[in-house]
Structure formats: structure tokens, C-alpha cells
Amino acid sequence: MTTKTERLAQLVKELRGTTSQRRFSTILGVSKSCVNFWESGLAFPDTENLEKLAVYKGWTLAQLQTYLVQGELPSSEPLQQILSTLRSLPTEAVAIVASAAVETLVSRSKSPQTAPNSVLVSVDKEW
């Protein structure tokens, strides 16, 4: 059985990805030792820091707390899953995703008939 401390440790490691503990702690505005303690299960964040982790994951504080206590992942639509994943990527990977997004928008603006909805077409006309 997985405890909330173990789930927290795994979540922090997932959110940190390949980012160093020092860099991740700077992003969250906490000390490096906090991140180290959370990952090793030696400490549990206060509510303020739980909220920072939730935001970084793309969840609400309530969703994070439910996950930690009950182990239930929040259900989310595909866009939310993509955004959550994006938020946990290293900066270099986010730049690659952003570049691909811009390329997609440019290609769609050149052929509005393939746009998934009229919003893109109307935005294209404004440009």
C-alpha cells in the first residue's frame, strides 16, 4: 500500500523531471532541502507549498490532497492532461513544444478550411 508521503515523493520527482533539486526549489520558492526532504519522505509540505505543487501539476489544491490521501488521480480532459505534462517539462522541451505549436498555427492560418472551428478563421481574418 502506498502512503501519502510515498505518493508525494513520487509526484515531486515526476514534477521535477530532469531539473535539479536546486533549480526546482528555486522555481517553487523553497529551499533545496525542502525538495530533498519531500522526495525522500522525511518531511511533508505545508499547505502553501502543497498549493505550489498543485499549481505546477495543473491541479487544484483539493485535487492534490485527494490524490495524496486516497491515491485517486483527478479525472481531466485531454487538454488539461497536455497542460499538466507541459508544466512539468524542462525549459528546453517547453521551447520545442512552443515552436511546434507556432508552426501548427501558422500552417492552419494558411489553409483556414482545415481549421477545426471558426474561431481560428476569424482570428486569421483579423491578422
Image (spheres, helix red, strand yellow):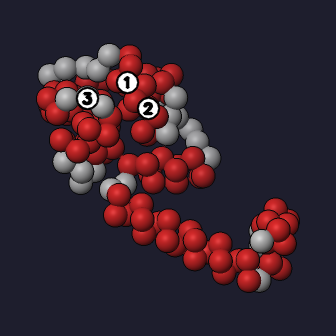
Q: Amino acid at mark 2?
A: Ala
Quarter of the image where one finds residue 8: top left
Q: Which mark's residue is nearer the viewer, 2 or 3?
A: 3
Q: Position of residue 53 (x, y in %)?
A: 38, 32
**Which residue is at a point 38% across and 16% down the rendered structure image?**
47
Q: Is residue 64 left or right of residue 10?
A: right
**Which residue is at a point 77% across and 83% down the rendered structure image?**
111
Q: Position of residue 4 (x, y in %)?
A: 31, 23
Q: Is residue 29 above or below residue 15?
A: above
Q: Which mark's residue is nearer the viewer, 3 or 1?
A: 3
The secondary structure type at the circle numbered 2 is helix
Q: Is residue 67 left or right of residue 76?
A: left
Q: Earlier in the sequence, mark 3 or mark 1?
A: 3
Bin the neighbour count of mark 1 within 10 Å (Cα to Cα): few under 14, some 14-19, many 20 and up: some
Residue carrying label 3: 30
Q: Quadrant of the N terminus?
A: top left
Residue carrying label 2: 54
Q: Is residue 97 above or below residue 78?
A: below
User: For this rendering, which residue is in front, 17 or 109?
Assistant: 109
Report how far apart the C-alphas of labels 2 and 3 lie in the structure.
15 Å
Q: For residue 117, say whether it is visible.
A: no
